[in-house]
Image (tube, rainbow, N blue to C red):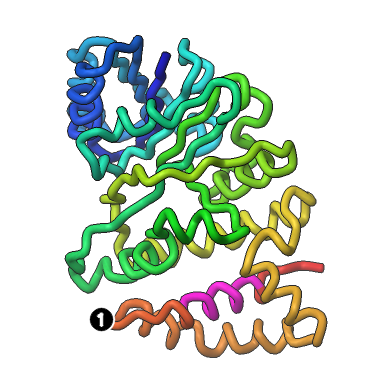
Amino acid sequence: MLSILIPTYNFSIVSLVKSLHDQLKNQNISYEIICLDNNSNSEISTINAEINKYNFCIYELLSKDVGRSKIRNLLAEKSKYKWLLFLDADVLPVNNNFIERYLKSVNDNVIKVIYGGLKYYDKKPTSDKLLRWVYGKKREEISLDQRIKTDEIHFSSANFLIDKRTFNKIKFDELLTKYGHEDTLLGIELRKKNISITQIDNPVYHLGLDLNDLFIEKSRKAVENLMYLQKKNKININDNRLLKSFNNLTKIKMDYLMALFFKKYANKMKENLNSRKPSLFIYDLYRLGYLSKIYKK
């Protein structure tokens, strides 16, 4: 009935698999846990290979990094059950009845996609990882009530359940080879096909907090992906806040000035983002400036 699909790269997933496996043993269902590794280093891959000792669990090391989208599609291709539960490697279920909560929400006739949500530990990390934690707390840790009330697409590939037949109609876009927005695009494709996302309270903790500089670099790559998606007409301006802001700048011919602003103050903004009080306003300004700098008419 249930295939749990976990892509990983240079991250130990043994604790996650053990937690899921312990919960699944108490459920009277057929299941499998499939883990594909995007060519991690030998130390991590050796640790993760321990997963093969668990019943109904498969760990496979790929010979090369195939990208964040393709690896998820490969996982789905290898699965054999009706329901696919996608989880990122760097998460851990908040609740001991995580699997049970998903199973209780399943309705074969109506529900096709279920999103459980994300959480972050309340304890602040060290200052060199603070930006990612602040962003997660403010932008990704959204309560069930908030997710239900807004018209925005609240969805993340870190924790969602989907009917396999539905997934095969959309899949992750393998043209996206760089970091960022593969789940944004999947959410948009679901909406285009009038497939609603059922929101439930079944979050996972996001454990993998990037160092500030790495998160800033990933954010730049995500902006590049966003620009690519918009150029290819795969995403509309109204589908993304950053694109909306950029479009407003172009309407009043301020995008050029924003690009100049970024060139002059990028390092100053990064000082704030690396500080003990990183500002998400500055973070958004940084991304908007970078988009203005690289955007080509």
Q: Quadrant of residue 288?
A: bottom right
Q: Position of residue 274 (x, y in %)?
A: 32, 77
Q: Classify 211 as above or below 27.
A: below
Q: Quadrant of the N terminus?
A: top left
> Residue drawn 55% across and 72% down?
287
Q: Classify 14 as above or below 147.
A: above
Say whether residue 149 is left or right of residue 122. Answer: right
Q: Classify 11 as above or below 262.
A: above
Residue type, numbered disc 1:
Arg
Q: Position of residue 170 (x, y in %)?
A: 66, 31
Task: From the image, give the main secondary structure of the stretch colored magenta.
Answer: helix
Q: Position of residue 286 (x, y in %)?
A: 52, 77
Q: Secondary structure at mark 1?
A: loop
Q: Position of residue 281 (x, y in %)?
A: 48, 81
> Residue drawn 70% across and 71% down?
244
Say whether residue 182 is left or right of residue 132. Answer: right
Could you tell me how many numbered marks the image carries?
Answer: 1
Q: Quadrant of the C terminus?
A: bottom right
Q: Which residues are magenta?
A: 283-291
> Residue drawn 46% across and 13% down?
81
Say whether residue 260 is left or right of residue 139. Answer: right
Q: Nearer the viewer, residue 213 or 98?
A: 98
Q: Classify 187 as above or below 161.
A: below
Magenta span has 32?
A: no
Q: Nearer the viewer, residue 161 or 200?
A: 200
Q: Quadrant of residue 258?
A: bottom right
Q: Quadrant of residue 92?
A: top left
Disc 1: CA contacts within 10 A as few (<14), some (14-19) or many (>=20): some
Q: Which residue is mark 1?
A: 276
> Residue drawn 68% across and 59% down?
239
